[in-house]
Image: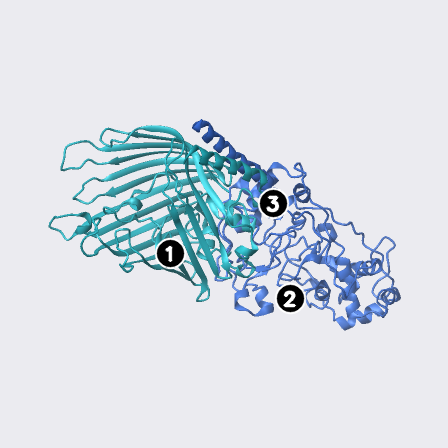
Amino acid sequence: MKRVTTALLIIGLVGACHQSAARAEGRFLATGPLPPAPVPVENPQTDAKVRLGAQLYFDTRLSADNTISCASCHDPRTGWANPHPTDTGIRGQVGGRNSGTVINSAYMRYQFWDGREESLEGQALGPIHNPIEMGETLENVVLKLNAIPGYREQFNAVFGTDVTTAGIARAIAAFERSIISGPSPYDRFVLGDETALTPAARRGLRLFNGKGHCTPCHGGPLFSDQSFHNLGVGMDKAKPDLGRFDHTKAPADRGKFKVPTLRNIAQTPPYLHDGSAPTLRDVIDVYNRGGVPNPWLDPLVLPLNLTDREKADLVAFMEALTGPVPIVEVPKFPDGPGGTADPKGGLR
Amino acid sequence: MKPRALGALLALTLLGASVLPPAASAIPVFARKYGFNCTMCHSNIPRLNDFGQRYRANGYRLPGRENAERTVLESPTPLALRTSAGFNGFRFNAAAGGPNSSTFELNGLDLLSAGLLGRNIGYFMVYVPEIAANRGVAAQRGGLEMASVVFSGLARDRLALRVGRFEPAYVAFSVKRQLSVAPCEIYDAAFPAGPAFSETRSGIELTGRAGSSLRGAVGYIGGPDTDRPYDAPADVYGRLSGVLGPGEGQTAGQRIGVVAYAGRTRPADGGGPREAYYRFGGDASLNLAHANLAVAWLMARDANALWADEGQNDTVTWSGGFAELSYLPLVNLVGFARYDRVNAPDLSGRDIDRMTVGGRWYFEDNVAVHAEFSRRTVARDPRHTGTDATESFFTTRLDVAF
């Protein structure tokens, strides 16, 4: 009888653990799809504002030489990001960082890799007056857009004023806030659809939250802890980009960059703040080596000892974080100085 | 353990399996708190990986994320359980004299609680219930095996102070988190009634780090059981280690360490003054891809009174160590082989050799089937006739934690 009891006890222990583990596979982020995007009280979403924001987003007349728009570096055709390692602005000037995706940027507490802006409204104006990107002054942009009747009318309809800097920021931010990804295979999995993830992606999920050490920074429904960490990428250069430090001047922030969302990450190569990783596999290799040694390396960035199969499984999991994104056509722009509207969208 | 108690444990286990909510199941305390899989901190349970080592050294706070930590009052119930059950077989030769046995057994039970009491105050507790030997249940000596509080964040997070009963830092390779069931002989070896090197001890321990690679610890702890209640604690120790390359030397980086221990205690019969004993040693944890080589060597120098030695020398010296190679070809498989050696004091001459091989296969992070074979040989006493005493141990068991 005692042997039988012991055997039953063993079976009970196995059952307890196995049943729980099956349930628990996706537990750490059992938050389902993204919640509704936060909208600031001072800039409520309206259809007219989003339409106006879309026009401004795609309009090259916001740049000094009418050649660069927001979409030039945050292209909807390439995951609302830049397929090149770093940005190219007016007159062919090359920037130092990779353009982050607009997808789900509405959820991010900080904008830009160094987090120097804490709202989409603040972010929207940054590239316009960045001398390397769009190279225009905000005053001149306001003058240029006020000279376009179609814009002036829309601004009056939406904001009750002519074109203003604040209006431009709010309209573009409202448009960007509409670019939200829908449920991904991962979301369907955590909601109970066991077939939503491939076996490789399921293995990748376990690695993501275990041996891969991903969740301490890439946790939560957005797969970002909305913070800044130092992986050491680029810190071995003679003049490294110090990231967050350039904004805060806090010594501990040297080499830290924002933790990007991993939702739809498969659509936005290349990766890392300097675009130095062409593929997700390359990013995993950086982590697998334990980052790049430097005095401010994040203490949780450690060599992972991942096998090739484990790396592939992690990639499969990250690919399963891809959800549908609104399809946005290039809108028709109002005629005016700097360009004439193309009936098919864009400018002629 | 009586059949009724065993039945109650069985019922409790099955009940737990059925009623525990998903978020609170299958994962012990820390994993449950953060929602991590066990492999976040363990290369293979129970051994810690570098991440887990840093977490422990940081006072049970995620390094760099201390401000986001939750205390035990804000976290899931901080309780966990670890046990194992399976087949054990022992074979002894005539010189060893033990009764051969082979049986299915429940091999003990650990109850564990840990977490943060405050922002920089962590605690760790392991309670081992007393279990009487019974057919089907291995005996277990009960007690509060560990119960310590660690104050972190001292000197800009460079120092931490641990108070209570804990596994001291001079045990370079934790026996609570070792892969094998068979003990490391040098950690078990001691003068008669003396403390095993790996025993948990009560006292205080200050740990610190300098730069990214240098680690140190000093401790002041109570003596072994042979001390009298009015004896002040008289044992001190220090450990210094360095890591070459990234990591903590657990699964990445190459760690080299040295330890020194000085203690005073009374002989086993409790008579006479306290006598001195010392331990010195070195250790290394070397990693290459998925393989780890753990090596430790200790030298002991004890007052001869502690060995009841009436020889001419003032001290008795002995030494020993082990080398263990482990290999993780897959995330859910680890194999290990270890050789133990103890060069016994001349007065005994009974040197010990142990060879252990085994492996663990993880069905889940926290459910492993463990198979191990170990053969221990104690050399015959050279002063007498006879043969070496050999003891063979085989086990295959299921090791679970939840």
- Residue A36 appears at what percent x and percent y? 73, 54
- Residue B169 appears at what percent x and percent y? 36, 54
Pick whichever, B70 or A182, lies toward us.
B70
The colour one sees for chain B in the rendered image is cyan
- Residue A89 appears at what percent x and percent y? 70, 62
Chain hosting mark 3: A
The colour one sees for chain A in the rendered image is blue
Cα separation between marks 1 and 2: 38 Å
Q: Which residue is mark 1?
A: B242
In front of the other: label 3 or label 1?
A: 3
CA neighbours of label 3 inside 10 A, class few (<14), some (14 to 19), many (20+): some
Q: Which residue lies most toward the front here?
A: B4
Type of amino acid at the residue the image marks with label 2: Arg
Residue drawn where x is 41% and y is 55% of the image: B148
Q: Which label belongs to residue B218? A: none
Work out whether A302 lies above or below B184. below
SS for dot 2: loop
